[in-house]
Image (spheres, grey):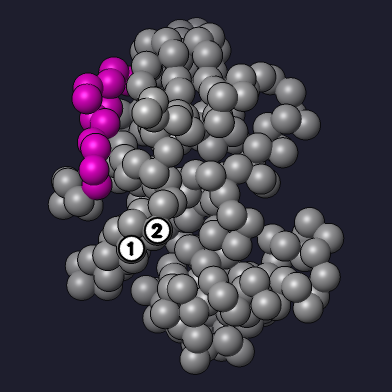
Amino acid sequence: MALENVVQLEKINKSYPLGQEKVHVLKDITFAVDKGDYVAILGASGSGKSTLMNIIGCMDIADNGDYYLNDEKVTKSEEQLERLRNQDIGFIFQNYHLIPQYTMLQNVMLPLLVRGVSQKRARIEAEVMIELVGLEDRHNHRPKELSGGQQQRVAIARALITKPTLLLADEPTGALDSKTGQEIIDLFHELNELGHTIMVITHDEQVAHQAKQIVRLSDGELFI
């Protein structure tokens, strides 16, 4: 049976102006991520991995080349980019991006409330996601009352609640100690076993080597 691509990049290039010059950040990037895969994009600072993440996450567009997300060609349409960000991608950030005045439950519910889902339904869905990440006894805690690892679990629950086809994690262990970081990676393994497609952007070799596939970036070039 043929594998189903979630992400397909074909000869992606991206440059940025620097004074009178142009810096070629991504150079003919071509690779695919299959449904159910767990891929790490590994690269040092300045390698181009953040730019690549922004393109995959529909937060930026390539200068040229083709990008398909779930077999849909991504264009320059801001309406399409916003729809794909909201419906198909679950973002997980290094610094969690939780709303400090909201409880954990409210933070997880928020993406569904923005979509117009009822409070009752959003609460039920949020409770399921919170239990999945192992924090069912922390519903009414605010971010400042949680450890870094717990906040990252809340962020993962929030990313999962919209049932995205791709979980895109930017340095998800970067603000955590090694033990807590490993617990988050273990959770990624569990989610991947449940069928979630995961991409992790990292500079950490240890984090990258726990994925099923490593894509290396160096000076804007890709090595698989």
Q: Secondary structure at mark 1?
A: helix
Residue 158 pos. (x, y %): 57, 64
Relative placement, left or right, of 185 versus 80 is left
Query: Residue at coordinates 48% horizontally, 55% vertically from top-left?
Result: 92
Q: Is residue 217 magenta?
A: yes
Q: Is residue 32 magenta?
A: no
Relative to 218, is 147 above or below? below
Residue toward you, 107 or 143:
107
Residue 194: give its label: 2
The quarter of the rendered structure image containing the C terminus is: top left
Q: Amino acid at mark 2?
A: Leu
For the residues bearing labels 1 and 2, Cβ distance under 8 angstroms:
yes
Query: Residue at coordinates 55% horizontally, 31% vertically from top-left?
Result: 70
Q: Amino acid at mark 1?
A: Glu
Relative placement, left or right, of 204 versus 122 is left
Write the start and end of the magenta stretch as one range. Answer: 211-224
Residue 147 showing in the rendered view? yes
Residue toward you, 200 or 16:
200
Relative placement, left or right, of 41 versus 121 is left
Residue 63: give its label: none
Q: Main secondary structure of the magenta part?
A: strand
Residue 106 showing in the rendered view? no
Residue to which mark 1 is pinned: 190
Residue 22 pos. (x, y %): 46, 10
The quarter of the rendered structure image containing the N terminus is: top left
